[in-house]
């Protein structure tokens, strides 16, 4: 499979990757090109900007959660028939698991997919020193995949001189620059950027940004670079033998109705997870625990993914009929998967950062409460437990939350990579899988199969 593609990466976090990536996507969209967007790592929020604000398909590529073969398959499947795929990096280019490895880094994704990389360099307070900086990144790995740079926060008067210096003293091409822009286009919260609907006039700002970058970045040369990317499977250099289909059982005849909480409070979900469930015969029925007074009818299963339930705890708590129906359904045996915020919603209450308690669904004992720091942050492997009564083997996962709960479950052992740290987590029964870890079903499709089999047993 051939997918024209590039990655926009950076030496560190906070250099403007998301803003510049969105600006380039907007500029390409305004040209009328068919574009797909991807995000390295487990991030949920950045792809929302691609999807909800710009109307572009966007997916995650994560070599820890899905494996190197998995990201190749997802990139080829989601990028096919597109004129270009833009992959946004995560953190610093070489920063991977444990803070001491390149595994699951932006580099790892670029290496797994043989994607040309354009490094975004923040030029505030730096000039000649940018050359050894670039040289170091090029030499750290024998094949760095870095083919060019874009210079961020640079004066137009300095650009031509900086471009000449960099191209004469390194082997990379300079693809343009980003002038110093007004602050505040993308605002932050404790789990990352604020969500698109919370940012005023964001669509108008992105159109303006796209117009600016059309003038300062050489989009034609970026398109040429994307065309030079090798095939993702087949024969020849930088290619791989791809399996014909993911290792899961497609069964579109099952016709399962799966309710999925999807609103401002529950919005952290991988599009590829949803598409996989649909390929396996699920009809996903969205509803809002915030604003709907009743669950959808005739459900065979329920999905409660993560998000920000703590920001809407009062509204969720006041929706008595929804809380009651979900408690009765899940306690009564409706198969349910609940991750992070969805897990918190199933506990007795959420206690916010001011100490106020809001009753929740009450399916699970204990309360969820605010903590002042990230809890068990990062990648992990789940072992030792069953999923809907079935052995599924190891499950790659990740956690990213400030809230914690009085009883996080004991069904699985969670182990941090490159570390001796381990703890118990997850509630698992024949009809329920709930806990703080987030899962990507391409990392272990048996999880999705077990859930759908449990939903199918309701139908049978």
Image: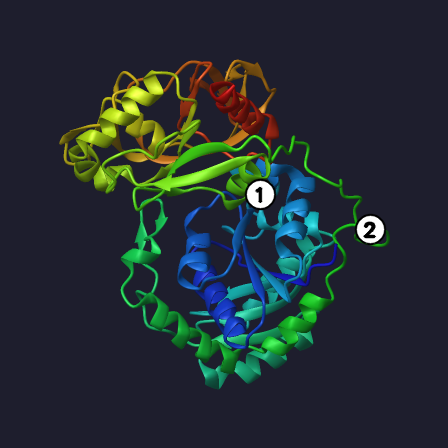
Q: Position of residue 347 (x, y in %)?
A: 28, 23
Taking depth in this image into account, of 45 and 252 the one nearest to the observer is 252
- Residue at left offset 41%, top offset 50%: 45
Q: Position of residue 77 (x, y in %)?
A: 65, 50
| Label 1 to label 2: alpha-carbon separation | 22 Å
Q: Quadrant of the N terminus?
A: bottom right
Labelled disc at residue 62:
1
Taking depth in this image into account, of 345 and 239 the one nearest to the observer is 345
Q: Secondary structure at mark 1?
A: loop
Q: How is colour applied across the structure in the image? A: rainbow
Q: Which residue is mark 2?
A: 234
Q: Position of residue 455 (x, y in %)?
A: 49, 24
Q: Nearer the viewer, mark 1 or mark 2?
A: 2
Q: Reply above or below: 282 against 126.
A: above
Q: How many marks?
A: 2
209 relative to 389 in the view: left or right: left
- Residue at left offset 40%, top offset 25%: 435
Taking depth in this image into account, of 334 and 181 the one nearest to the observer is 334
- Residue at left offset 53%, top offset 26%: 452
282 relative to 82 in the view: left or right: left
Mark 1 Cα shell of 10 Å, populated few (<14), some (14-19), many (≥20)? many
Q: Is residue 420 visible?
A: no
Q: Secondary structure at mark 2?
A: loop
Indicate which disc, 1 or 2, sits on the residue closer to the N terminus: 1
């Amino acid at each position: 499979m051939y997918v024209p593609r590039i990655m926009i990466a950076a030496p560190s976090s906070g250099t403007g990757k998301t803003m510049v990536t969105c600006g380039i996507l907007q500029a390409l969209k305004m040209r009328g090109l068919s574009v797909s967007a991807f995000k390295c790592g487990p991030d949920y929020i950045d792809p929302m900007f691609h999807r909800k604000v710009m109307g572009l398909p966007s997916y995650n590529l994560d070599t820890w959660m899905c494996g190197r073969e998995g990201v190749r398959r997802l990139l080829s499947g989601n990028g096919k028939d597109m004129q270009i795929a833009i992959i946004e990096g995560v953190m610093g280019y070489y920063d991977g698991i444990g803070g001491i490895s390149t595994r699951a880094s932006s580099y790892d994704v670029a290496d797994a997919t043989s994607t040309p990389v354009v490094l975004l360099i923040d030029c505030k307070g730096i000039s000649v020193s940018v050359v050894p900086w670039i040289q170091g990144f090029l030499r750290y790995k024998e094949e760095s995949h870095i083919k060019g740079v874009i210079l961020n926060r640079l004066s137009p008067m300095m650009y031509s001189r900086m471009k000449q210096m960099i191209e004469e003293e390194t082997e990379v091409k300079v693809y343009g620059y980003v002038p110093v822009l007004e602050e505040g286009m993308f605002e932050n919260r404790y789990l990352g950027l604020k969500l698109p609907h919370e940012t005023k006039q964001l669509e108008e700002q992105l159109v303006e940004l796209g117009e600016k970058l059309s003038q300062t970045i050489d989009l034609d040369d970026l398109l040429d670079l994307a065309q030079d990317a090798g095939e993702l499977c087949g024969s020849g250099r930088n290619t791989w033998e791809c399996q014909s289909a993911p290792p899961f059982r497609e069964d579109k005849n099952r016709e399962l109705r799966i309710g999925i909480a999807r609103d401002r409070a529950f919005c952290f979900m991988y599009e590829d997870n949803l598409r996989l469930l649909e390929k396996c015969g699920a009809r996903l029925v969205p509803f809002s625990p915030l604003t709907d007074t009743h669950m959808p009818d005739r459900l065979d299963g329920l999905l409660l993914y993560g998000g920000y339930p703590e920001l809407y705890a009062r509204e969720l708590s006041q929706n008595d009929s929804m809380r009651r129906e979900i408690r009765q359904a899940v306690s009564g045996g409706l198969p349910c998967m609940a991750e992070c915020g969805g897990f918190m919603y199933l506990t007795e209450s959420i206690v916010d950062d001011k100490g106020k308690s809001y009753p929740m669904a009450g399916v699970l004992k204990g309360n969820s409460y605010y903590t002042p720091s990230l809890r068990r942050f990062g990648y992990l492997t789940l072992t030792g437990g069953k999923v809907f009564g079935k052995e599924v083997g190891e499950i790659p996962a990740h956690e990213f939350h400030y809230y914690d709960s009085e009883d996080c479950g004991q069904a699985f052992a969670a182990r941090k990579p490159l570390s001796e740290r381990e703890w118990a987590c997850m509630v698992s029964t024949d009809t329920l899988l709930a806990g703080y870890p987030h899962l990507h079903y391409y990392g272990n499709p048996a999880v999705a199969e077990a859930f759908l089999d449990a939903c199918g047993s309701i139908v049978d």
